Every structure is written in C-alpha cells, then in structure tokens.
Amino acid sequence: MAWLLIGGRSFFAFGQASKPIHFGTENGLPSNTVYYVMQDREGYLWFATDQGVARYDGYEFDVFTEEDGLSDKDVFAIVEDARGRLWFATNNGIPCFYDQGRFYNPENSPLLAEVNIGGYIQHIYPSPTGDVWLLGQISGLFCLSPEDTLKRYSFGDEWFPAGVGHYQGEDFLYGDAKFPATIYEDSVETPSRFETEFPFYEVGSIGYKPIFIPQLGLALTI
C-alpha cells in the first residue's frame, strides 16, 4: 500500500509502490489546489484545479486553460457523459465540455451559447436517459438531450436545490427537506416527498470509486 498525495490531499493507493507518490506543480500540475479527480473511459486521470484542468496519462501531465478553449480556469468538478464528453463545473458558470480533442464553449457551440447559469455551475448530472443536466448556484436549470436540444427550467426563489438525480425512472431535483421535486417535460413540480426510504445517498455527484493507473501499478480509491 502507498499514499498518493495530490496537492494537499492524500488518497490510499494499492499496488507495487512502497513509498508515497506526490503530484504537485513540480510534477506538472497547474496548481496544488485540486478540487476534483476523475478517470475517463480511456483511462486518463483528469484533475480540476483553480488554474485549469490537467490530464495525466501515467507518465506526464497535459494542462488546459482558457487558451485551449476552457471557459474558466477555476474548475470545481469534471463529469463524463454517456457519449464520452467531459463536462466542467466552472466557477464563472460558463458551460464547457471536451470532446475528441477539442473544447466546446459558448463561442464555438450555438447550443452552449443558450445556457445562462447564475453563479457557478453547482451540479452536472448525466442521466441514465442520456440527458445532461446543468444546475446553477443561484439560478438556471438546463437539460441537454441526446439529440442536442436544450430545455430550460425555472423554479421558485425559495428553492435551493443541491443537484439532479434519477430514481425509479424519473429525473428530479434534490436538496433540503423540501425536496425532491419531480421534473416534467415543461416544468418542475412543487416539491413533494418520496417514501421515507428514498436513497439520497445514491444520487450525489461525488462518491468513492476505484481508479486504476497501470503504468504505476496502482489502484486508487478516489
């Protein structure tokens, strides 16, 4: 067992290594402030930082910033959808995704130009239906369909949803005790409670999962 240290955070690592492995700016990360780590379907590790995002192939880092098409250097999370696109939860609320070697943002994607998020992007949720949901910190709930159509939903100012989830065939907003609220085709229903055994813990965007880096002989739990 070894420790993998990323910025100021540490993770258990299981494999052949017998000493701590540290990733920081001296190794190629753009910053030691790392908000989020994920592994895409091709095996790359992606790091969300306050100075851009970094992709690690097991040997070296590639760093991406606004100069590459990222809509904000301050990225809180990275989420992969069913099509393999990587979505970035940006601090400025401007949507952005990465697909087949290119970044898409409102300047080169007419669809993203229609997304108006209030505050930072609080939650990105790829639904089992193929939809991708974007939720703003202050306002804005958008759904991008597999057919690349966009819908915007509004809800009352007294609502403070934390994210979007999927349960028993339905997408819904969840948050405090007033939720969940069912999302219909053209509206969000007044919040009403599901049965008491509703599994809130299953719908969060951040959870523990294994990540494998064959080049280092490591299996991590992030």
Image (cartoon, rainbow, N blue to C red):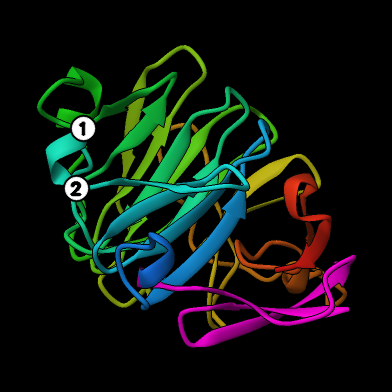
Is residue 183 in sight in this rendering?
no
Question: Where is residue 123 drawn, in percent x and y?
Answer: 44, 59
Amino acid carrying label 2: it is: Ile
Front residue of 8/136: it is: 8
Of the 4 image quadrants, the one containing the N terminus is bottom right
Residue bearing the label numbered 1: 105
Residue 211 in magenta stretch = no
Q: Say which label, 2 or 1, has the lower sequence index.
A: 2
Residue bearing the label numbered 2: 94
- Pointer 2 local density, CA inside 10 Å: few below 14, some 14–19, many at least 20: many
Residue 144 falls in image quadrant: top left
Magenta range is 1-25
Is residue 24 in sight in this rendering?
yes
Report whether 76 appears left or right of 12: left
Residue 14 in magenta stretch = yes
Look at 57% across and 27% down and name the residue there: 84
Report whether 65 appears left or right of 133: left
Look at 24% across and 61% down and name the residue there: 139
Secondary structure of the residue carrying numbered label 2: loop
Look at 54% across and 31% down and name the residue there: 131
Rounded to the nearest whole Å, what is the CA distance between mark 2 and mark 1? 8 Å
